[in-house]
Image (tube, grey):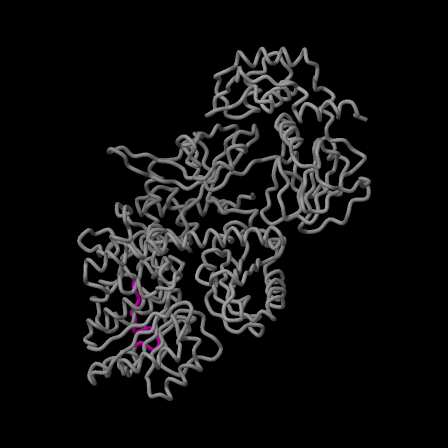
Amino acid sequence: MKIVYGEKLNSEKEQLIRQIALSCNITFDTARLLFYRKQDTVEKVKRFLNPSKKGFYNPKMLSGVASAVEKIKNAKFLSKSVLIFGDYDADGVCATTVLYNCLKDFGISSISMYIPERSEGYGLNLETIERLRDKNNFDLIITVDCGISDYDKIEKLKELGIDIIVTDHHEPPEILPDCIKINPKLCGGAYPFDGLCGAGVAYKLGYALIGEKANDYLDFVALATVADSMELVSENRDIVAEGLKLFNNPKKLRLCMKYLLGDNTKTVVAQTLAYAIAPRINAGGRMGDANCALRLFTSNNPNEIYELAVKLNGYNIERQTWCDKIYREAKEKIQKYSLNKRSVILVKDENWQTGFVGIVAARLVEDFAKPVVVFAGQDGFLKGSARSIEGVNIHEAINANKDLLLCFGGHSQAAGVSVSKQNFMAFESALNDYISSHYVALDVSQSIYVEWEIKGEFPKQFAKEIELLEPFGVGNKSPLFSTEVTKVKANPLKENSPHYSFRSECLEMLNFNGEKDVATLSLPVPKKIVFEVNVSTFKGKEYIKGYVRNVSADFSDMSKLSLHAINNQLDSILSEQGEFKMLDKTNLPPTDVVGTLYVISDLKNLKEYNKLSGLSVSFAKPESKNLISEIVYAPAVIPQGYDRVIYLDKPITVQNTLAKTYVVKDLVGYDFIKKLDVERTYFSQVFAHLVSLKNKPFFDIVDFVNTNAESFEKENFLFALKVFIELGIFSVNNKVFTYNEKVKNALTNSKLYSKIVLLKGNYV
């Protein structure tokens, strides 16, 4: 993983940052963070650190607002009925809620609301509207979070004598509806900020109608802004900051929000909205009951509010189960068909449900660091949800290939798309061609942005001041830092916990679901720990901890890893033997950009391969998530997904894999077995010593050998120890080395021992 640091500062910029720090009464480090976020003047910094309603822009600057206000005033004067037509996601539900309350406060006496289910599709639905009109003869429809792409439908509604006001924030199509339109992206710069969410646009219209009274609903707008992954910059930062004040004011916290927050009410931040509330609101729409959340937000009955919150929580649990299932299946397909070799991953299954593919796409983006589109089947065609990475505009890429689609919509980081089954492969190819040609060197899984490296203890005052940059989210991410460690022993937070902690010179580190990093942390090579900083208070005392986001080892010098490599090779003996073809080292197959994994068992053999000198070398497992060609020294297992695996020297065992596998016949990668002692006398000596080590701590086998081998050669001691453990004579229980006195077993019953004896006998 390549770490990309913030720019190095020259003396002129350092002086500017010092002036900002002094003028704003903050540390130099905090001012530097703000400088990296383009807050490079005292005025900008003060504005950034004090988000408030003062930063809101006048809604009358939005084109269409004045006309919409006049039309709504006319509807009030003539006692017309109004239908608010929303969308089934959290933004659409919140936008509907905000506009409903504002219209009610304005004095519209007859207001109805409609949130379509996902099965009805996104946007205006003519059949639904005609059915609704039969029940309630409304005269005016106001869309929220939709409508900008519904030219044809709006024309038909106008023919029925229905007035339309469109409020939306999505990317405008080439042909716009011929009606009043409020969309910050249509203002041509007249409105200073075009990043509002759907609820933000609804709020602006509401404010134009009722003034500051609309601020009572900023909690809904803040929730929608975070839920719809809008950038938390400019006016959005002010909106979310003001909305969070309502969440954190016990007198203003709504009962519905309190029930949705559960135990998360202590201090509500943007991330609380993203992970505690938004998934529950979205769960209703994903489970076919989008109106559940709308009823929750607009009800005044405490019993009903409680029941609806419980229902949404249940939906969310069920949604998680379905998403986990689809996620596992999608990942299996990606790995089976090597879909992650391409610039954008498209994965489909007609049996998946459309309501869950967006969440799955977002999770897969995190796994593979590439744009992902997940498709499910619906009514004879495929409906997909796209999520992207920073720097890749997925909406633009989809728009460039719109001729292959039935419909699409969205914004730069997320989009929805529908395609016929016949056009799927053509769309997949075209989308990949577009992204690969417009975004060069897309293997961004190899890089992570970090502000700077911390040497020594993390400054306490700086840690506390980082909170001043809240709210964090898209466009204003929580800052990441790095620190260097060498050999670290990570311990589970409690017995059988998947979460680990360890101490660095910088901070106490917490690594959630960190079992995957334990082995790497224990290696005696330099490692960069990338982390976020958290300040918490317990019993009046402040604690600063780091939350690990990445562990990246420096394998430029692997001289200290020989014992670890031997351990991995000995482990591979127990693996299933795979099929392979032999080849000469001068006759390697062509090296692909992606899809080839080179394996080396003995590092000294690498000097025979000058043509591979440009490839990165990692230990035990590939660094790339996307099958980029690289060399792996002594891999414990061979990951699936590669087209070919080439062993650059003969290993102890060729591991079984679906890839085409080749072994270079000229070089041997297991010279170390010459030194291994297989005599019973030697094993008796090791056995006696191991008995004396019973009840010793055992966290890692190589560490145990290094600590306890004493006069024994470490390679031999490791080999004997692994044989005894395989035979069950010794074992490890709860990180304690245990002698099982009742177990009697012959050395020849060990697969490891027998294979080494055979190899020593046949060694050439």
Residue 671 location (% of width, % of height): 74, 26
Residue 764 located left or right of residue 172: right
The part of the chain drawn in magenta is: 56-65
- The secondary structure that dominates the magenta segment is loop
Which residue is rendered at x = 66% and y = 26% of the image?
A: 752
Residue 720 located left or right of residue 241: right
**Res 616 → quadrant:** top right
**Res 188 → quadrant:** bottom left
**The stretch drawn in magenta includes residue 457:** no
**Res 426 → quadrant:** bottom right
Q: Is residue 323 above or below residue 394?
A: above
Which residue is rendered at x = 24% and y = 51% of the image?
A: 248
Q: Which image quarter holds the N terminus?
A: top right
Residue 364 location (% of width, % of height): 51, 53
Which residue is rendered at x = 50% and y = 22% of the image?
A: 698
Observer able to see residue 598: yes
Residue 38 located left or right of residue 614: left
The residue closer to the viewer here, 54 or 341, is: 341
**The stretch drawn in magenta includes residue 64:** yes
Residue 645 located left or right of residue 533: right
Residue 286 location (% of width, % of height): 40, 61
